[in-house]
Amino acid sequence: MVSRVWPIAGGSAVLVLVMLCTPGAADAQQRKPWRLTGALRVETQYDDNIFLLTQVRKQDLNAQDAGLLGNRYADMQHSNDLVSTASLSLGFRGPGLGGRTLTILPAVSMEYYARNGERQNVTVGLSLEQSLGNGGELRLRGETTPSYFPKNYLAAATDLDGNGSISPAERVYAPGTYRETEVSADYRLRLSKSRRRSPLGAALRVGGGYVDRRYESETLGRDRHGPTARAELLLDFGRRVGLDLGYRFEQLTATPTSQVLILDEPQFGRDLNGDGDQSDLDVRTTEVVDRSRREHRLGADLALGIGRRSDLTLEYEYRWRTYTSTEPGDVVYNGRTDARQVVGAELEIQLARRVRFLLGGEYARQRLNRASDIASIGEEDDYTRRRAFSGFAVNF
């Protein structure tokens, strides 16, 4: 349900393409002039679980008892919020390679949180879209989010009273603020064109890219990077029905890092604090953890024209993650798998030629193959999330 713009990076190849396709190029002088193009989308969204917490953790956060919780929820004011989003893309469309249409589209998106101010963020991007023959298209895209605060994560713990267990007040959490950049390229091939006698139209889009996420606190060991790949089958059944089927794959690598964990001895059958028994709870230990993983996503979007001025889109996505850690003491990620399902709907009502009213919602549910946040590190775990939004979209 989240519209995203994609930044561009990639250096000289992109620069050459832009130079060849700018309004000053020789071919452009003999063809239609360049014109302004863009889109604006403004919406307000209610999100009942912005930090992706279990029901118990949501209650802890909303209670905000600093004496019991330490700084685990610092700068996290409430589990739900009203989020205002404004996304603007504004660029130029004109003759490119071979005289076919080239679109150069910078974009910016901003999120404002009514309660949780630390979550405010900005994403900037650039997209180059070059039309090719027979309905083909080449796209170069990318985006960068300079700073984003998802939640706090366990960074340290000290047994101040010497009782062998770590109370919530003895745990130190650090903000998991990160910077993320993703670049990608894809190619669309038209397989068949929708016609009156044969209304089924089909196209295949394939591509790949690279994603890099860097956290401000290196001690958290959460940096990851790696290649991505995706494929989409785009179907349209006449003018009022469309179906997009998509698959995305990510292979993300992290550096194995020594981390502080809070574990219960009976659960693992180990004497973690060296007191001669295996019965203590909330014991501090240090283990090497590896957050490397493989991620798969399968999705489907069904677009239906339900009136002269109304369109309804139904969405479904299934995501599963397999963590590849082989560290023997990594009780958090070794053997872990996550599964998440998302269903959503969006209604568009045309108010004027270029103005649409938007209304929609989304429900997400994630389940792990083990106990949630087993080491009290603030990890994403089992959760449900509901979102509802309304807004406007304007095309230029």
Image (spheres, grey):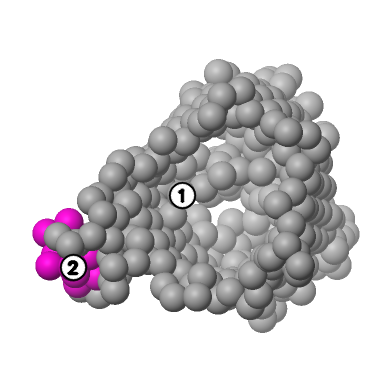
Q: Quadrant of residue 219?
A: bottom left
Describe residue 262's horizontal placement relative to residue 94 as left or right: right
- In the foreground, 21 or 372: 21
Residue at 73%, 62% in the rendered image: 196
Image quarter where the C terminus lies is top left
Image position, residue 11 (x, y; %): 24, 70
> Which numbered marker is on residue 129?
none
Residue neighbourhood size for the residue with mark 1, other residues' Cα within 10 Å, grouped as few (<14), some (14–19), many (≥20): many
Q: Quadrant of residue 21?
A: bottom left
Disc 1 marks which residue?
5
Residue at 69%, 65% in the rendered image: 195
Of tags 1 and 2, the one toward the viewer is 2
Residue at 50%, 75% in the rendered image: 134
N-terminal of the pair, mark 1 or mark 2, is 1
Describe residue 201's horizontal placement relative to residue 136 as left or right: right
> Which numbered marker is on residue 27?
2
The rendered magenta stretch, by its main secondary structure, is classed as helix
The stretch drawn in magenta includes residue 311: no
The residue segment tinted magenta is: 16-27
- Please name the amino acid that badge 1 sits on: Val
- Please name the amino acid that badge 2 sits on: Asp
- Secondary structure, mark 1, is loop
Is 295 situated above or below 24? below
Image position, residue 287 (x, y; %): 61, 67
